[in-house]
Amino acid sequence: MKAEKVESLRIQKEGVIDDLKVCISYIPNRENDLLCFMEQYLKADIKDRPRLLEEIKKCIDGERYENPFLNYYCYDMEDIEKLDFILEDFIDKIRSLNNNSDGQIEKIIAETIFKINELHDKCLGELIDSWRDERLTNLIDSACKCKGYENAIDIIQRKKLW
């Protein structure tokens, strides 16, 4: 596999990893935060509402308040780093293969998808959304096509749980 193709695959991978990092990076925005708190309040048990009202009040008054999105984070930097490692390992294994290694490619795809499935499950099904699904599928497919393997999408679709 040519160096520029490996670099292209790594850039694709970084796009997914960067997107995951942005989703757990919090930058306070009073208007968005207030909307989030209000949504939580409407859905909350009665016993949780006083705490949420206090956070809403702090947000309105411009005081320091908790991150309203913490309840939505189902993965953290450690999980992102695990996915990064899984994808780097996949790229390295595919890169090191000789062409016409269909059986080995299929095994590598299956192992990679299994590892991603486990991580996605650990993250309560929130790690891989439809945008990331499409990009991961394209990344795996592109890497395999570089080695002359054309059936990666079929294996991915059969094995993935995301």
Image: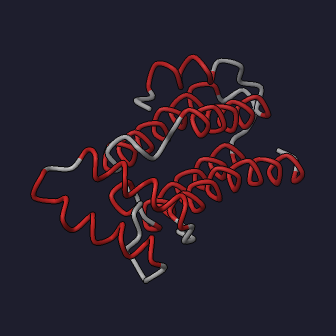
- Asked if residue 72 lies left or right of residue 93, the reply is left
Q: Quadrant of residue 150?
A: top right
**Number of numbered tags placed on the structure image:** 0
Residue 5, relative to residue 157: is it above or below? below
Residue 151, relative to residue 92: is it above or below? above
Q: Quadrant of residue 124?
A: top left
- For the C terminus, which image quadrant? top left
Q: Residue at x 60, y 61 (%)?
A: 22
Which residue is nearer to you in this view: 57 or 147? 57
Residue 124, relative to residue 88: is it above or below? above
Q: Quadrant of residue 27?
A: bottom right
Give how far across and how far down residue 152 sits, in percent. 62, 24
Q: Residue at x 53, y 25 (%)?
A: 156
Q: Residue at x 39, y 63 (%)?
A: 68
- Asked if residue 150 lies left or right of residue 42, the reply is right
Q: Which residue extends farthest left?
A: 47
- Asked if residue 37 lies left or right of residue 101, the reply is left
Give how far across and how far down residue 30 sits, in percent. 53, 67
- For the N terminus, which image quadrant? top right
